[in-house]
Amino acid sequence: MTYEEALSYIHTNFWQGSKPGLERTLTLLEKLGNPQKKLRFIHVAGTNGKGSFCSMLSSVLIEAGYRVGTYTSPYILRFNERMKVDGKDISDEMLARLTEKVRPLADSMEEKPTEFELITAIAMEYFAEEHCEVVVLECGMGGRLDSTNVIENPILSVITGIALDHTAFLGDTVEKIAGEKAGIIKEGRPVIFCGKDKKAENVIREKAASLSAPFYTIAREGLKIHNTTLDGTIFSWNGHENIFLPLLGTYQPENAQNVLFATELLRKEGFNLSEEAVKNGLKKVKWPARYEVVSKEPLILCDGGHNPEGIESAVSSTKLYFKDEKILVVTGVMADKDHLYMAKCIGQIASEVICITPENPRALKGSDYAAEFRSLGTPASEAESPLEAMKIAIDKARKESKAILCVGSLYMYGQIIDALNHLR
């Protein structure tokens, strides 16, 4: 099987969409010999901040000398990003070989696995073959019925925060969504809730208590920001002094606090994590499409904020770095998001908005999104493609000495990068 054939096979399951439940994943893993039972996990759920947490913690663990598997979704530029060992994407050859191994087992199942379930099984086999000492495992959606929730005894469970997202699957209230995320908590194993919503915290705290799982929240007081620029942030918190974090955004120091707190619990679990490893791990972390500078001339930033909370964070970050200066915004969203509210937020920082239609069946038409912006009093137009949008935005940015922010969907990121590469 070639790499292209492997991807084609994996994506054939896309039509099945999301079918909650663990039975298919468990069946497939059992046919593989239960590779997940050979591994130790840090399980991460949450509405926003999961990916940043996973990338930071993985970087710290790698710096400390551990062999680390990392499982995240969705990918940004290449499918292989979804599973890494020691920070390196799975190779094309390895992905092809493992898919070829898993394929006949998946095909033999009476109820076929979904795409995400298939990928999860491939990742488990990969991490087991690579003898990973610890796997940082991000939930795909929800928690209780997410296919990653087949693991039995995590070192640590982390719920980064709760907000209204994927409401059709997870519930239409914060409490219902918190209940789904809390499904990753296991008997007697510690759990950290990193969010601020008290209703969500109460649900998760009660679930932890019912399972005799030590429950922790994070005290935000004491965070000191010493310096923040578009090169990164220097901060101190709880005895961790002068930490440099290259990831931008007002939310990233708080994400880093979550990681610092997690390292303290991991030390109690027997992990050897020196302060030097923690500092260097955070200093070296890379996580694209999160308020990332992708061009300096003109200044272009990309942020994957794709729901109201994510957009609020991107807007807050823009106000931090650009003060009262309005900037150009290139944006596209999924139709199932609260795009009117997102447009209201973006209008606070935008001198003008150029709307596109992301390459996804769920995408809102760029013309419809532009009309929403105009109805709110924000100048907006539609571009036929990301390439056309970036041509228009770059021309305006140079003429008006403005920065550009591309935001609204992670699915846009690859399209924007391709457009910029074409224009260079």
Image (spheres, rainbow, N blue to C red):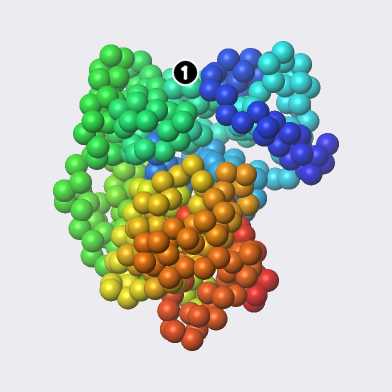
- Give 18 or 143, whichever is nearer the viewer: 18
Q: Is residue 150 visible?
A: yes
Residue at figure coordinates x 40%, y 22% from the top left = 183
Most foreground residue, 70 or 407? 407
Name which quarter of the figure residue 352 lies in: bottom left
Direction from residue 319 to residue 340 in the image, left or right: right
Q: Which residue occupies the extreme front position in the image?
A: 375
The quadrant of the image that shows the C terminus is bottom right
- How many numbered marks, from 0 up? 1
Q: Amino acid at mark 1?
A: Glu
In the image, farthest residue toward the bottom: 399
Q: Position of residue 186 (x, y in %)?
A: 38, 19
Q: In the rendered image of this protein, does residue 283 appear above or below residue 228?
A: above
Residue 154 location (% of width, % of height) = 43, 24
- For label 1, the residue is 152
The picture places residue 68, in percent across and down from the top left corner, at 52, 39
Left or right for 131, reference 140: right
Residue 207 screen position, x and y as percent: 30, 19
Tell me if 36 is positioned left or right of 283 in this view. right
